[in-house]
Every structure is written in structure tokens, then in C-alpha cells.
Image: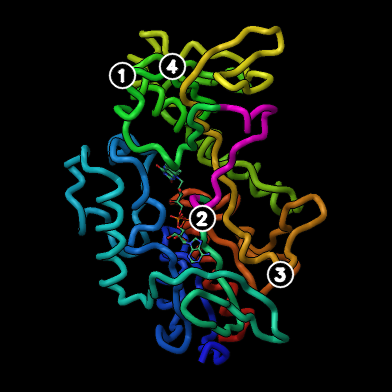
Amino acid sequence: SANVALKVDIVVIGAGQAGLSSAYHLQRRGLDPQRGFMVLDHAPQAGGAWQYRWPSLTLNTVNRIHDLPGMPFSDAVDIDALEVEAATAVPRYFAAYEKRFQLPVWRPVTVKVVCSRGERLRIETDRGNFSARGLINATGTWEKPYIPDYPGAQRFKGLQLHTKDYRTADAFAGKHVIVVGGGISAIQLLGEISLVTTTTWVTRRPPEFRQGPFDQEAGRAAVAMVEDRVRRGLPPTSVVSVTGLPVTPTIEAARARGALDRLPMFAEITETGVRWADGTEQQADVILWCTGFRSALDHLAPLMLREPGGGITMTGRLATQVARDPRIHLVGYGPSASTIGANRAGDAAARELMTYLAL
Ligand code: FAD
């Protein structure tokens, strides 16, 4: 019956990099994959949010996807074929990984809400309810695209899309496209769209292109900065976006054809385009918001984990534990919102939660 909850010690929500790393470490530390823990995932197949990425995002054009713990990517996918789509390769790798370690992933299961019931947590889903003593939440950001508010957005008669809606540039042929946002997604999509049609690029701040190769030191500093923020209860900023924009041959070509001549943010949206504060207008058929994502945590609302300022105060070795409710870990959140961060955070969360619950 819908009222009988299946009982386990730990529920992991999400089977992306963060959820699978957590599951691997729970199992390795001896938690029983039947009664001890289970992973609930909303997606139709293995792969986390990678299965939804646009086709031109290949292993060649992603920043870098780190191997999950215990099994290299190359065991499942021919990594020399760099043109292979991330949306195909990563699901193939994750599926092989789940199989090799026999991880108890249940899908498709959508967690609707998590509430506290005394000592236990009640996890309500579209496939029945679960009861757990601890929770590792690894739901990523893909389900929560962020579009900033600009006056007139409702008035616009053209098409407004977010990064997550993008499939191929051909859909925009013959249309004028305004791309909003200063991150890697914005320049990658501009690089493709500006090959087939006219574009305008707007960003809040002047973009910073990376000089030379990725700077490990700068990467670490960025992660430390985000970790410091969440330990103080402030909302996290993105860790994957603070490393400077890479200059690939595609980006260089886009720059040469003028597609990366950036304009400052407009002041308002009109019926047919956008208008800057000085009255200048640009007509457009499409506004493509490459304005990022937020953490998908709405299902945790009843637990009231947030501080008045909107952030969640995090503690623990890698800042995965929620200070207000130590039964709950957030992995892939804040400083661990990268494939390498999610790997390490899954290890720390598994260890700390099992210790806390005396498992
Ligand atoms: P996800 O992969 O999003 O997995 C979350 C899982 O939780 C999904 O399967 C989802 O279905 C499930 N879920 C969500 N809500 C619920 C719910 N209520 N109930 C049940 N299940 C739920 N990082 C890098 O390190 N290198 C890169 O090259 C890189 N490229 C990126 C490119 C793009 C376009 C984007 C958007 C991000 C990129 N990132 C990259 C960041 C990347 O998303 C993370 O590093 C990592 O893949 C996130 O893993 P995750 O497990 O936290 O989340």
C-alpha cells in the first residue's frame, strides 16, 4: 500500500557522478545493497544529466569528465574516439559501472518530497514511499535552469530558450539569436549558432578568456572560495565556471568572425527584441538564456535546511553535511559540483554518514 514505506538505512537521491560515487563508497564500506541503501533516480536510463546534453557536446568539447572511483571510462567507451557524444558515452559508462558494482539503482523514480518523521526521514516518490535514517542528496542542477528576470520578458513574441533546451544550431537558421551569459555554454553555443545565422552576445561582465592551459592553482582557489561560502551558509557560486573561458579553435574562429564581440546587458525586453538603457534596440527572433542552473533541492523544502539568506550551512570534512540536520549530506552541491569534486565528496559523505548512524 502507498502508506507502507520501504525501510533502509540510507537513501541516495540521484544517480549522476555524485550519487554513483556515494553509492560506490557506501557499498565498499560494507553497507548492504539490499537493506542498507538504495539509489533513487528520476532519469529513464543511466548517465545522470549527461544523457540530456546537446549532441555537439562531445568528449572533445567538454571540460573534462573524471572517471568514477574504481573503474576507468576506457573500460566502457573507446576514449580515442573523441568525437563521440557525451550524451551517448557517459550513459554507456555509467550503465557499465552500475552493472559492474551491482549498485542498487531504482529508476525511473521521482522523489517528490522528503520530510522528517522523528528519528527517520520519509521519502515520498511517484513509486511509493521510503523510510531512511540518513540521506545523501545528489540531484545536481539540470532540473533547475536559471533565467534572470528582465522587464518585458512576458511581452516578447519570439522564442525564449535556456541552455538545457538547445539541440542543434540548424534550428535557428535565418533567425536573429541573442545569446545571454558569459560562461562556457554561452561561447560554445555562440560558436555553433554564429556559423549558421546572425547573433548578438550580451553578458553582465566582460568575459575573461583563459591565457594558456587550465590553471590547477586557480581551480583549487575557486573551489576553496565556494567551500568557504557554503560553510558560512551563503548560496554557492558555480565552480565549473570560474576557471576562465577556454580558447579552442572553434572559439577562436567565432572570435575572428566577430561573433564574440560582446555587448553589456540590455535593460529590458520588448515585443520584438531587446533595448538598452540608452535607447538602442536590437530586433531578435530568439533569446537564448545561457544563464546557468541552481541546485535542484525543492524536494527538501519541508526539512527547512535553508538559512534566512537562502543558503544552507554546510559542515563536515568536505562540507557535504548539512549543519542543521546532520542526517543529510549534499553531494555535487557547492564545492563538489564538478565530476572530480563529486567523486571526493561521495567518499567523504559515505564515511561520515555511516559513522554518524553507527553503521
Ligand atoms: P547529475 O548528473 O545532474 O545527476 C543528478 C541525477 O539526479 C539525475 O540523474 C537526475 O535525474 C536525478 N534527480 C534529480 N532530481 C531528482 C528527484 N527529485 N528524484 C529523483 N532523481 C532526481 N563538470 C565537469 O567536471 N566537467 C565537465 O566537462 C562538465 N561539463 C558540463 C557541461 C554542461 C553543459 C553542464 C550543464 C555541466 C557540466 N559540468 C561539468 C558540471 C556537471 O554537471 C557536474 O560536474 C556533474 O556531472 C554533476 O553530477 P551530479 O551527479 O551532481 O548531477
* Vertical position of residue 93 compared to residue 214: above or below: below
Residue 224 lies left or right of residue 1; in this view the side is right
Q: Which mark is residue 302?
A: 3
What crowding class fits label 2: few (fewer than 14 Cα within 10 Å), some (14-19), or many (20 or more)?
Answer: many
CA–CA distance in space, label 3 to label 1: 47 Å
Residue 49: where, in percent of width, then height? 41, 53
How far apart, in angstroms, are the residues tagged by discs 4 and 2? Answer: 30 Å
Give coordinates of residue 304: x percent, y percent. 75, 66
First in residue order: circle 3 vs circle 2: 2
Q: What's the amino acid at mark 1?
A: Val
The segment highlighted magenta reads 142-156
Q: Quadrant of residue 129?
A: bottom right
Q: CA distance from mark 1 to mark 4?
A: 9 Å
Q: Is residue 122 magenta?
A: no
Residue 104, which numbered label?
none
Whether the residue carrying mark 3 lies under 8 Å from ligand 1 is answered with no
Q: Which label number is shown at residue 196?
A: 1
Tell me: is circle 2 under 8 Å from ligand 1.
yes
Q: Which residue is mark 2?
A: 140
Residue 199 is marked as: 4
Label 3 to label 4, Cα distance in Å? 43 Å
Nearer the camera: disc 3 or disc 2: 3
Q: Amino acid at mark 3?
A: Pro
User: Of the residues shown, which amino acid type is indicated by label 2?
Assistant: Gly
Q: Position of residue 319 (x, y in %)?
A: 64, 58
Does the CB distance between marks 3 and 1 fall below 8 Å? no
